[in-house]
C-alpha cells in the first residue's frame, strides 16, 4: 500500500511542479491525499531554496499537509532534530555515527536516524580577470592562491596550466567567506585532501587566512562582479555572468555542471562505520576519474527510521519520497540550481526512504 500511495503522490507532484513558480512556500494546494498534519524541519541555509521548491510541490499535491522549514543553519538543525524539536533536519554535515543510534528525537525509541544525501551543488571558482574568458586550475594552484603564496595572474604555475591564455601581469585578489559556512568547510576539505602539501590546514567552517572577504555566496558574487582580477569560491547558482574555472582531474580539466558534480558521489565510498541504510558519502576530492568534478557540497536530509507518531512518519515518508524522486530533484535543479542525484544514488536513497514510517 505504501509503495502504491507514494507512486501516486509523486505522479501528482510531478504535474504540479510545473505550476510552482508563483506559489508561496506554505500555500496549500487542492490536491487530495490520505495525509494530514504538520511536520517541521530546520537546518542548512544552502538547502533553503530547494526546500522551498520541495515543500511547495508537496503541499500542492497534499492539501491537508503543512511542512515548515527554518534555514537556521546546519548545526542548529541537527541540534533541534536530536532534541525532538523538529521532524527532520537539513544539514551540510551528517550526524556522527553514534548520534544515529538509540533514542533519537521524535523517533520510535531505539529506532535511530538516517542521513540521506538529497542535495548536491557544485562549488565553483568564479573569476573576473581582464582579458581572460577561460581558466584552468589545479588544487595546488588554488591552495597557493587562497593562502596568498601565489599572488600574480602571470605566475609561471598559472601560465603552465593555461597555455595561450592572456594572463595579465596583475595582482590576484582572492575573496573568501567572512562568515562561518558549510561552503568554506567543503572548499577547505577539497584543498586539504587534493593538495595537502600546499594546504595543511584541516577543513573548517572558518577560513584560516586573512584577505578580501564577503558575507555569503551572494556577497562574494557582488565583489567579483564589481572587481577586476578577482577570484572567489561560491555556490554555482550565484555565479551567473562570471567566468568559472575548470579543475584538473586526472589528465584533463573538468568544468562544473550538474552531471560532473553528481558523478563525484558515484565514485565516492560510503563513510566507514555506518549502518547500511545511513548514506553518508566520503567524497573523493582527489579523484582522477575523467568527467568528475570534486569540489561539491553534499547536503543531507536527516530523518527517523521510524517515528513515534505514525501519522508524522507517513508524512515524512511521502515527503522524502518526493524530495528524492527524479521529478523532485529536477524541480530543485530548475529553481535552486542544484545538481540532481544520479540514477544510481537516487535508487539507493529511495530504497531507504521506502522503509521510513
Image (cartoon, rainbow, N blue to C red):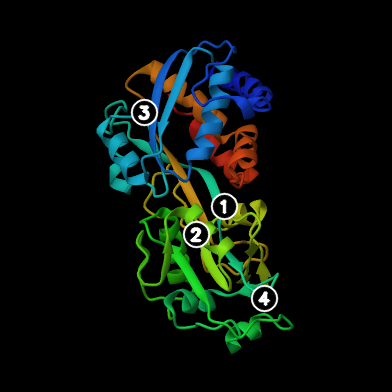
How far, Cα to Cα, is label 2 from label 1?
9 Å
Q: Residue furthest bottom?
A: 156
In the image, which is nearer the foreground, mark 4 or mark 1? 1
What residue lies at 57% left-to-right and 10% top-to-bottom? 32
**Label 3: few (<14), some (14–19) or many (≥20) C-alpha neighbours in 10 Å:** many
Indicate which disc, 3 or 2, sits on the residue closer to the N terminus: 3
* Residue 54 percent across, percent down from the top left: 54, 31
> Closer to the N terminus: mark 4 or mark 3?
3
- Asked if 70 appears above or below 190 in the picture, the reply is above
**Residue bearing mark 1:** 238
Measure the alpha-carbon separation of dots 1 and 3. Answer: 30 Å
In which quarter of the view is residue 88 placed?
top left
Identify which residue, 148 or 101, lies in the foreground: 148
| Position of residue 157 measured from the top left corner of the image (x, y, whole percent) | 58, 86
Secondary structure beneath dot 4 equals loop
C-alpha distance separating marks 4 and 3: 45 Å
Disc 3 versus disc 2: nearer the observer: 2
**In the picture provided, is 129 more to the left or to the right than 45?**
right
Left/right placement of residue 275 relative to residue 133 reads: left
Query: Please, what secondary structure does the residue beneath circle 1 have?
Result: helix
Label 4 crowd bin: few (<14), some (14–19), many (20+), radius 10 Å: few
- Secondary structure beneath dot 2 equals helix
Question: Which residue bears the numbered disc 4?
Answer: 251
Earlier in the chain: of badge 2 and badge 4, it is 2
Q: Nearer the viewer, mark 1 or mark 3?
A: 1
Q: CA distance from mark 3 to mark 2?
A: 33 Å
Amino acid at each position: 500500500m505504501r509503495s502504491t500511495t507514494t507512486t501516486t503522490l509523486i505522479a501528482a507532484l510531478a504535474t504540479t511542479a510545473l505550476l510552482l513558480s508563483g506559489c508561496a512556500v506554505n500555500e496549500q494546494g487542492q490536491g487530495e491525499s490520505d495525509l494530514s498534519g504538520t511536520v517541521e524541519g530546520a537546518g542548512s541555509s544552502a538547502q533553503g531554496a530547494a526546500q522551498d521548491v520541495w515543500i511547495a510541490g508537496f503541499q500542492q499535491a497534499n492539501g491537508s499537509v503543512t511542512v515548515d522549514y527554518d534555514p537556521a543553519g546546519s548545526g542548529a538543525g541537527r541540534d533541534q532534530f536530536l532534541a525532538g524539536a523538529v521532524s527532520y533536519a537539513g544539514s551540510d554535515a551528517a550526524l556522527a555515527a553514534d548520534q544515529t543510534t538509540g533514542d533519537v528525537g521524535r523517533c520510535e525509541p531505539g529506532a535511530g536516524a538516517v542521513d540521506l544525501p538529497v542535495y548536491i551543488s557544485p562549488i565553483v571558482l568564479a573569476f573576473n580577470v581582464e582579458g581572460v574568458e577561460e581558466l584552468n586550475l589545479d588544487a595546488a594552484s588554488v591552495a597557493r592562491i587562497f593562502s596568498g603564496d601565489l599572488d600574480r595572474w602571470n605566475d609561471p604555475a598559472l601560465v603552465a596550466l593555461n597555455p595561450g591564455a592572456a594572463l595579465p601581469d596583475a595582482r590576484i585578489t582572492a575573496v573568501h567567506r567572512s562568515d562561518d559556512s558549510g561552503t568554506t568547510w567543503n572548499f577547505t576539505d577539497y584543498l586539504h585532501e587534493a593538495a595537502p602539501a600546499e594546504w595543511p590546514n584541516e577543513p573548517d567552517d572558518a577560513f584560516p587566512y586573512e584577505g578580501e572577504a564577503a558575507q555569503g555566496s551572494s556577497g562574494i558574487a557582488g565583489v567579483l562582479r564589481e572587481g577586476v582580477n578577482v577570484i572567489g569560491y561560491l555556490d554555482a547558482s550565484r555565479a551567473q555572468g562570471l567566468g568559472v574555472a575548470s579543475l584538473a582531474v586526472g589528465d584533463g580539466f573538468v568544468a562544473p555542471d550538474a552531471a560532473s558534480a553528481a558523478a563525484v558521489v558515484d565514485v565516492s565510498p560510503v563513510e566507514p562505520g555506518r549502518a547500511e541504510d545511513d548514506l553518508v558519502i566520503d567524497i573523493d576530492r582527489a579523484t582522477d576519474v575523467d568527467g568528475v568534478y570534486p569540489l561539491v557540497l553534499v547536503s543531507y536530509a536527516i530523518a527517523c527510521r521510524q517515528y513515534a507518531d505514525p501519522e508524522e512518519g507517513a508524512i515524512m515518508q511521502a515527503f522524502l519520497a518526493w524530495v528524492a524522486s527524479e521529478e523532485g530533484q529536477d524541480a530543485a535543479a530548475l529553481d535552486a540550481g542544484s545538481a540532481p542525484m544520479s540514477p544510481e544514488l537516487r535508487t539507493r536513497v529511495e530504497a531507504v526512504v521506502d522503509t521510513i514510517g
